[in-house]
Image (cartoon, rainbow, N blue to C red):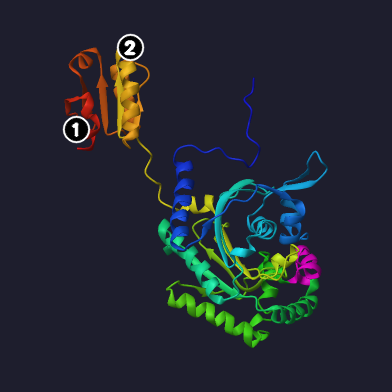
Amino acid sequence: MTPVQPVRGMQSLLGEDADRLAAVVAAFDRVRRLYGFRRVEVPTVEQTQVFARSIGETTDVVSKEMYSFEDRGGESITLRPEFTAGICRAYLSEGWQQYAPLKVATHGSAFRYERPQKGRFREFHQLDAEIIGAAEPQADVEILSFGYQLLQELGIAEGVTLELNTLGDPETRDAWRTALVDYFKAHRGELSEDSQTRLERNPLRILDSKDARDKAISADAPAIDEHLTGEAADFFAAVTAGLDAARVPWKRNAGLVRGLDYYRHTAFEFVTDRLGAQGTVIAGGRYDGLIEALGGPHTPAVGWAAGIERLGMMIDAPPAETASVAVIPLGERADAEAQRIVAGLRREGIATEIGYRGNMKKRLARANTSGAKYALILGDDELDRGQAQLKNLSTGEQRGVSLDLIADAIRQ
């Protein structure tokens, strides 16, 4: 019988691969606490309209990539493709407005139906950090500082660049959008087929097209700085000044955009050339109009998401998890006593394994392979003396220790 295979684009991880993801999450949790972001959990499944309204029905994510289906009640539900929409839905439906400004962070699985490739899977894992209910540029500085400190904590900040842009306020955005539409219409025939479609639905997206034809045309497109209101310019200046004060390095990328209308002011990506084409490791921005799109009141917010797999590929391999001691019982009496000893050592906070099978030589070999520092050998002769043999697996030194003093002997 042929073994059952995993669903395409889903992964099962063991050993170093799983440890890399765990190391990223652990670093995220440490930095989250430093910045005062509260841990939050949101459902893996939401009503489809939550994502259709927030991500945009004309985007590739909603039109092509979401795992959506009808449940038994006939309701359209979707496996989350990202976290922000679900957090904003919860902010409204769970009464979290009372905590504004609310700083929250979470991590977990997300799902998109797309072609699997290096660093990209159909089930993937994200980190997410949001500040909801804060209109001040200081919130943007804090969320960006959080991202930068995470990269430092992971030891990869040197290989990553923060690219930053402003999308302005609604007045700025409307004027810029009009100028872009006029410009691109004059070059419609030279645009890629995708960008000709975007021209009608989402013209800002043409600016981040990877098609060489679009890039050449976009190079001379109207710049947002030509349309910035004084208020928008001041906001961006406050963000960049705050980043400089916090010693977070950044560079301007005037072509960095977000196509949906609810995005405002700051847009950013932390990018690297160490992952090939999939070079963005953290991405986000200010989305002051999103909660309104979900039916709530005007609520300013800013946040980011990061791919755990991509970050995990960049960090040094974490040390393997190993036991301090491997207990090797020999005989039925020793088996029973070993269970008592193992339980006691674990309660003392000493990581312990037990060798279940094989002769003495094989059990010692497995103890060595496991990375344990010590082997604790227990047989009938040792039990008669009230002792066990403690062997240092690095030096080969072996000595008898009292059954009541094993934990002390290991610590020493």
For the residue pair 39 and 158, the one nearer the viewer reads as 39
How would you rate the neighbour count of disc 1 (Cα within 10 Å): few for under 14, some for 14-19, many for 20 or more? Answer: few
Image location of residue 63, percent across then percent down? 77, 54
Q: Amino acid at mark 1?
A: Thr
Span colored in magenta: 190-203
Q: Amino acid at mark 2?
A: Glu
Identify the element where label 2 is drawn.
helix
Q: Is residue 200 magenta?
A: yes
Q: Is residue 352 left or right of residue 120?
A: left
Q: Is residue 222 left or right of residue 349?
A: right
For the residue pair 16 and 246, the one nearer the viewer reads as 246
Which residue was labeled with disc 2? 332
Which labelled disc corresponds to residue 395?
1
**Magenta span: helix, strand or loop, mainly?**
helix
Q: Residue at x 53, y 51 (%)?
A: 308
- Residue 63 seen: no
Q: Residue at x 31, y 31 (%)?
A: 345
